[in-house]
Amino acid sequence: MKKNVLVIWYSQTGQLTNIVQRFCSSLDAAKIQVDYCEVKPIPDFPFPWQDEMHFYSQMPACVGLKALPLKLLNTSLKEKYDVIILGFQPWFLHPSIPAISIFENEKLRKLLNNTPVITLIGARNMWLNAQEIVKEKLNECGATLIGHIALVDQAKNLASVITVQRWMFKGLKDATFFLPRAGISEEDIARVAVFGELLSTNLLNNTLPQLQEAFEDGNSVNVKSNLVILERTGVKNFRKFAAYIDKATDTTIRLQRLRLFAFILSKGVFILTPISSLRSKVIGFFNQEILKKDIKYFKGINYQKDQF
Ligand SMILES: Cc1cc2nc3c(=O)[nH]c(=O)nc-3n(C[C@H](O)[C@H](O)[C@H](O)COP(=O)(O)O)c2cc1C
């Protein structure tokens, strides 16, 4: 009997759609039926973002895990799948609003229940906290995480802060004289087909428990120690800032606080990041063994509460 795989994902720019398609291109079409379920929030987010403040004003909702209603672009879904691939992206160090909304959708929750799931992330470079939240949500749905793949922009952290803004606000992705191309490289996206093949083999041989090991051997995830420390600091600060913004009941004061957040994230980051990087190097130097353990954990599929 044919195996059934479902892919659920959201993509604002089309990047994650490319990743999902590459992954599935190597699933054995003769023996595996793949159903695609792209989701769109109502209302959807425009790309490019027409207004920069619209972009930054999503932060408190992301941190607060606020969901939107979803439109499922595939309405003829089966009752049950052998594996679900969940493609998502982080926004402000948390699952994107469309991604968190997947867990509030009754139909998708039912499909996730009692089903093996592979998470497939396309990010700039900070996705650890988002993945921890998704792991918790999967547990709540009764799903089992069996594999994890994360693709990131390989550019230097500060370079990608600039290129991601140019991409998001102007829709420009190409490299310039000074800047690398925005987003995940074509080579990395093409390489994701290898992981699709691994899923094919392990699904057809009924060896899914071995899948994550095969993924890790193929470098499905690369975690940099300095980014672990930077992200931990970032998550704490985002939570504080989100609470500070949400406390403002007056719309003018709320807007002022959002503007301050936007300024710090877009401009202040060039002063703060070198300081934080130096700090994370010092912390990393004195905590090498703990960091090694952290990296092993974040590459894996186990879930331990309160990592952030
Ligand atoms: C509002 C917003 C916030 C983002 N925040 C992060 C982030 O915290 N960490 C990260 O690695 N990437 C971040 N990104 C990049 C996305 O994760 C994603 O890679 C990019 O938006 C590509 O779009 P797509 O996945 O919708 O195709 C952000 C993007 C947006 C639009």
Image: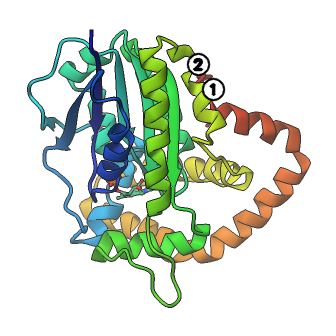
Q: Quadrant of residue 245?
A: bottom left
Q: Nearer the viewer, residue 205 or 72?
A: 205
Label 2 sits on residue: 210
- Residue 290 placement (x, y as % from top left): 82, 37
Contact? badges 2 and 1 (CB < 8 Å): yes
How are the residues colored? rainbow
**Callout 1 amino acid:** Glu
Disc 1: which residue: 213
Q: How many marks?
A: 2
For residue 264, side relative to residue 69 (left or right): right
**At x 71% / y 64%, what residue is drawn?**
276
Say what amino acid the circle numbered 2 marks: Gln
Q: Residue 108 at x, y = what percent?
A: 24, 23
Q: Quadrant of ligand 1?
A: bottom left
**Residue 140 appears in the figure:** yes
Residue extending farthest to the left is 75
